[in-house]
Image (tube, grey):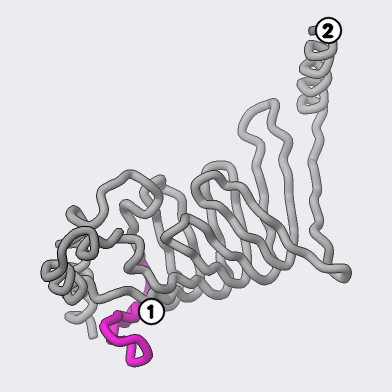
């Protein structure tokens, strides 16, 4: 199975410059794991199914990381798509590289770390095309204190939708398990807030 994985990844890399050239989150992705398989997806013709198992670590272009027990990626076979696109006139032959990702799903012990944010969940389903991530199960989002004026925040919910470009988040709870938010105020934070408020009041 290893030669197939290497061939598929090399085929993918060989056409990256022509399909996708930008410095966003997905412009460079490194995946490591203890085991990995790659095979044709019988349910979706002309697609490849990559499965990464055990201690999966994904590092993105901005050095943010996602860790999980398993990762499944369903991806168009670019070599086949490229051959077809060459036969079509533009713009029909042009296809954004992100559109080739049909599924990117992290499962079990999902941990996302980006800048001062850390996120935990049971499952994370990435929508590569629009830079969002759907988080499900025991979602915990933490914003750490990186400077004196920051107020650490911890949020818990059943589900959440995360915008990976802006880090804006939509949280979902229920009557039984409402969205829970905890602000950790410290003396320095309160002092900074009071000074800012006083200065604003005198303007």
Magenta region includes residue 13: no
Whichever of callouts 2 and 1 sits on the residue coming sooner in the sequence is: 1
Which stretch appears magenta?
Answer: 32-51
Question: How far from the left and from the top, in percent, is residue 124?
Answer: 55, 68
In the rendered image, the residue lying farthest to the bottom is 42
**Percent of width and height locating residue 91:** 23, 59
The dominant secondary structure in magenta is strand
Membership of 43 in magenta stretch: yes
Above or below: residue 143 compared with residue 103 = above
Residue in the image at 74% along x and 53% along y: 155
Residue 1 picture location, percent across and down: 23, 86
Decide if residue 119 is on the left or right side of residue 198: left
Q: Quadrant of residue 111?
A: bottom right
Q: Nearer the viewer, mark 2 or mark 1?
A: 2
**Point 43% across, 69% down: residue:** 56
Q: What residue is disc 1 on?
A: 51
In which quarter of the view is residue 137 placed? bottom right
The quarter in which the C terminus is drawn is: top right
Residue 106 spot, x, y in % from top left: 50, 71
């Amino acid at each position: 199975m290893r030669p197939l994985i290497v061939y598929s990844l090399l085929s993918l890399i060989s056409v990256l410059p022509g399909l996708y050239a930008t410095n966003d989150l997905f412009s460079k992705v490194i995946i490591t794991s203890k085991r990995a398989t790659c095979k044709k997806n019988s349910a979706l013709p002309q697609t490849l199914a990559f499965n990464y198992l055990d201690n999966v670590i994904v590092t993105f272009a901005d050095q943010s990381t996602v860790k999980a027990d398993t990762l499944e990626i369903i991806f168009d076979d670019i070599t086949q798509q490229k051959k077809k696109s060459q036969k079509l006139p533009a713009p029909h032959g042009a296809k954004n590289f992100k559109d080739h990702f049909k599924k990117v799903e992290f499962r079990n012990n999902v941990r996302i770390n980006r800048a001062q944010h850390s996120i935990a969940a049971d499952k994370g389903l990435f929508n590569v095309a629009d830079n969002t991530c759907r988080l499900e199960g025991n979602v915990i989002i933490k914003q750490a204190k990186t400077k004196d004026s920051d107020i650490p925040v911890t949020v818990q919910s059943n589900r959440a939708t995360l915008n990976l470009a802006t880090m804006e988040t939509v949280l979902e709870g229920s009557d039984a398990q409402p969205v829970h938010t905890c602000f950790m105020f410290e003396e320095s934070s309160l002092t900074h807030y009071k000074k800012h408020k006083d200065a604003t009041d005198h303007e």
